[in-house]
Image (spheres, rainbow, N blue to C red):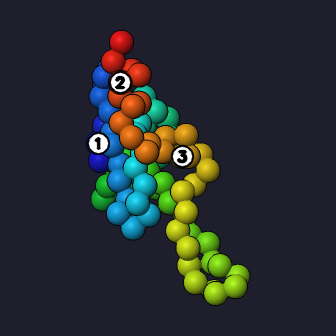
Amino acid sequence: MRHELRPNYWFLFYSERMGLTWIMSSAEFLKECVQNKSGKNVGNRSIWFNGTRTDKATSKKIEYCKPQFEKYLAPDYSRFKANLK
């Protein structure tokens, strides 16, 4: 996606497979995302909240939230209320 810094602009990301929701401000998104440098999507921004690891006991792939994004996990929408001041 294309995005430039905007005040009072929030992103709400949801993963149905993992059942997790992340809430990020515009500034936080820009700090955490990567910007494509080549290819047909040059200039667009991307972010990957999940990683996969293999369970040694069952040899199945398991998705998990990457540790650097755990601070943005939101069980409810109280983060919006805290920043309305």
Give the mark, 1 or 2, whose residue is nearer the N terminus.
Answer: 1
Amino acid at dot 2: Lys
Q: Which residue is at 64% across, 87% downward?
A: 58
**Is disc 1 placed on a helix, strand or loop?**
loop
On the rendered image, what quadrant is the C terminus found in?
Answer: top left
* Image disc number at residue 2: 1
**Is disc 2 placed on a helix, strand or loop?**
helix
Q: Is residue 50 left or right of residue 56?
A: left
Return the x and y of residue 24 as percentages of the image width and height.
41, 36
Calculate the distance from the C-alpha at mark 3 to the C-alpha at mark 1.
Answer: 20 Å
* Image disc number at residue 65: none
In the rendered image, which residue does mark 3 sit on? Answer: 69
Return the x and y of residue 13 as percentages of the image width and height.
35, 49
Q: Which residue is at 70% across, 85% downward?
A: 57
Residue 75, above or below 10: below
Q: Is residue 67 left or right of residue 85?
A: right
Calculate the distance from the C-alpha at mark 1 to the C-alpha at mark 2.
Answer: 26 Å
**Is disc 3 placed on a helix, strand or loop?**
helix
In the rendered image, which residue does mark 2 sit on? Answer: 81
Q: Nearer the viewer, residue 17 or 32?
A: 17
Q: Which residue is at 50% across, 60% downward?
A: 50
Q: Nearer the viewer, residue 57 or 33?
A: 57
Amino acid at dot 3: Phe
Question: In front: mark 1 or mark 2?
Answer: 2
> Mark 3 packing: few (<14 Cα in 10 Å), some, or many (20+)?
some
Q: Which residue is at 41% across, 30% downward?
A: 79
> Mark 2 packing: few (<14 Cα in 10 Å), some, or many (20+)?
few
Return the x and y of residue 6 as percentages of the image width and height.
31, 25
